[in-house]
Structure formats: structure tokens, C-alpha cells
Image (cartoon, helix red, strand yellow):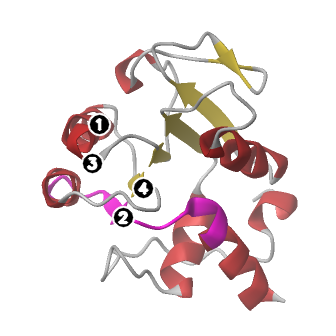
Amino acid sequence: MDAERAGGMSDEPAAQVADPTDPSVRELRAILGDARAIAVVGLSSDPMRESYDIAAYLQERGYRIIPVNPRETEVLGEKAYPTLRDVPEPIDVVDVFRRAEHTPEVAREAVEVGAKVLWLQSGIVSDEAYRIASEAGLDVIMGVCIRTARRRVEREAS
């Protein structure tokens, strides 16, 4: 495991998340410690957008960022793809910056491409997306910022 990316995270086995809106540090550590490739759905090339800032933070921590946005060609030096189905490599986490009503289709795509985790950012919660992803065996986090979660795990490790 990449020590910088791990940030003190252990090699705990992946855990089914008990409460997707309030994951434990142990659950976050398992998910973020195992992740290498994070597809960011709705990632913008505008440095003033939160999606850009959070993806840059994750990239600085050693994660491979895969931009997914049909209106972009490249973000943070990485080729952008119109959909998850177009990504030619394995995806560990699908981090979503789209309105809740768009997340069920993203969940279906995440299942189709074999992602391990569906992560809906702060303020995004969808029972339908949760059902689609969890019934297919994905871990699901909803309404939680992935950067805040990563920082929480780092604090607990120190």
C-alpha cells in the first residue's frame, strides 16, 4: 500500500457500512485505505468549484483521479470520460457531485463497471441510489464529503 496515500490507515478488510450517512472511522479507513482509483462524477475543470478542490486534495494524497463529465476533456492533468462506462480501467470509488435525482443512474453505472464504493458527496442523499448499489454489494456513503472523511481518518491515526 502506498504509504502517503494510506496516511496511517491500516489494511483492515472492507466493511459493509452500517449507516451510510454516518460511517465510522473504521469503515472509512477500510474504504479509503483500499481505494486507489476514484472516479469523480461531475468533476469540473473550474478551480473555483468544490469538485475540483476536493479532487485535487485526493490527487495530492496519492489517489488516481478519473474525471467523469461529458463537458470536460481533461481535469487535473487526467483525461475526462463522458460516463463511467467509458472509463477503460478499474474503479474503486465512484465519488458523485451530481444532484440526487441523477444518482440512481450513476449507481447503475457504478454497479455495471464493478466499482466497490458509491460515495455521494455532502448534501446528496438518494434512497434509490443506495438500494441499487447496496443490493449489488457496493459499500455506500451518502451526504458525506470524502475530503472531510479522509481528514477524519488522518486525525484518528495520529
| Labels 1 & 2 near each other (Cβ < 8 A) | no
Q: CA distance from mark 1 to mark 2?
A: 13 Å
CA neighbours of label 3 inside 10 A, class few (<14), some (14 to 19), many (20+): some
Relative horizontal placement of residue 28, taking residue 63 as reference (left or right) = left
Relative horizontal placement of residue 12, taking residue 95 as reference (left or right) = right
Circle 4 residue: 119
Q: Quadrant of residue 96?
A: top left
Q: CA distance from mark 1 to mark 3?
A: 10 Å
Give the quarter of the figure containing the C terminus: bottom right
- The disc labelled 2 sits on which kind of residue? Met
Circle 3 residue: 100
| Labels 4 & 1 near each other (Cβ < 8 A) | no
Question: Residue placed at 79% from the left, 49% from the top?
Answer: 62
Viewer-nearest of discs 2 and 3: 3
Q: Nearer the viewer, residue 69 or 110?
A: 69
Circle 2 residue: 142
Ranked by sequence position, the earlier of labels 1 and 2 is: 1
Relative horizontal placement of residue 63, taking residue 118 as reference (left or right) = right
Q: How many marks?
A: 4
CA neighbours of label 1 inside 10 A, class few (<14), some (14 to 19), many (20+): many
Give the quarter of the figure containing the N terminus: bottom right
CA neighbours of label 4 inside 10 A, class few (<14), some (14 to 19), many (20+): many
Ranked by sequence position, the earlier of labels 4 and 3 is: 3
Q: Is residue 33 above or below residue 78?
A: below
Circle 1 residue: 106
CA neighbours of label 2 inside 10 A, class few (<14), some (14 to 19), many (20+): many
- The disc labelled 3 sits on which kind of residue? Ala
Q: CA distance from mark 2 to mark 4?
A: 6 Å
| Labels 2 & 4 near each other (Cβ < 8 A) | no
Secondary structure category for the residue under label 3:
helix
Secondary structure category for the residue under label 1:
helix
